[in-house]
Image (spheres, rainbow, N blue to C red):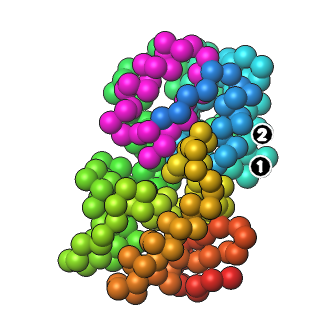
Amino acid sequence: MKLLIIEDDKHLSETIRETVEDLFETQQAYDGEEGLFLAEQNIFDVIILDIMLPYMNGYEVLQNLRKKNITTPVMMLTAKDGIDDKIQGFKVGADDYLGKPFHREELLLRLEVMVRRNVGTFKENVITFKDLKLNVKNNTATIGDELVNLNGKLFELLEYLINNKNTILTKEQIFDRIWGFESDTSATVVEVYASKLRKNLKKFNYDHYIKTFRGLGYMLTENGEGNV
């Protein structure tokens, strides 16, 4: 899973990254404008957002995200611990609020609750779609008792689709999520991998659950409507 840390204290940001590295792939931003730009890509599973940031504070970052209907769970992180600050954070769309200093165990527990609330699994390391199960700890996929051959980025693509089922994911979102902003390849690789994924799922009759929106992107749908 992917976590965005928006925190201008680089030492604290690195401490958070090290704390969660067994659970999340992280990306870091050190000011509000950079954080907003990254968060607007809508490719993260959760965001840790400091309030006191250069250029744009955390409240402004979060307000902009919610205005654009980006619903990524956000934990606000701040040295301020007053009730008024918490109320303001929740009013602009925060999902949780953690004051500094904090214990490593509390941070992990709160992240676990946020992810479980939005994705449904965490400690079990398994996500499901109908009879399809992905074990995200050992990168294996099964349908019933049969193993599905999904290597590397094919596994990541299916995981991303399942975690966002019934939601259209644009090709750009998928590319940024799986290949990264700085990848040397082009976004057309998404079409190649979507086709490969369908072929690998076809023997199980699961290929038709991946719905193509031509010129836009893909969606995993429970009714299996096919292409649009």
**Can you give x and y, in whole percent of width and height, for residue 14 in the image?**
46, 20
Instruction: Say if residue 24 shows up in the picture.
Output: yes
How many discs mark residues in the rendered view?
2
Q: Amino acid at mark 2?
A: Asn
Query: Is 155 in front, or is 164?
Result: 155
Q: Residue under label 2, please give it.
A: 64
Which of the 4 image quarters holds residue 6?
top right
- Asked if residue 219 is positioned above or below residue 199 in the image, the reply reads above
At a point 47% along the width and 52% down the height, the residue shown is 117
Which of the 4 image quarters holds residue 221?
bottom right
At a point 73% along the width and 52% down the height, the residue shown is 69
- Asked if residue 225 is positioned above or below residue 13 in the image, the reply reads below
Q: Amino acid at mark 1?
A: Lys
Picture quarter with the C terminus? bottom right
What is the distance, in whole Å, between disc 2 and disc 1 at their CAs?
A: 6 Å
At a point 59% along the width and 39% down the height, the residue shown is 182
Q: Residue under label 1, please give it.
A: 68
- Do the residues bearing badges 2 and 1 touch, measured as CB atoms within 8 Å? yes
Would you say 25 lies left or right of 218 here?
left
Residue 175 disc label: none
- Asked if residue 223 is positioned above or below residue 114 in the image, the reply reads below
Q: Secondary structure at mark 1?
A: loop
Residue 22 falls inside the magenta stretch: yes
Instruction: Say if residue 95 shows up in the picture.
Output: no
Query: Is 206 in front, or is 193?
Result: 193
**Can you give x and y, in whole percent of width and height, for residue 12 in the image?**
49, 16
Residue extending farthest to the front is 184
In the rendered structure, which segment of residues is drawn in magenta?
A: 1-25
Which of the 4 image quarters holds residue 7?
top right
Q: Secondary structure at mark 2?
A: helix
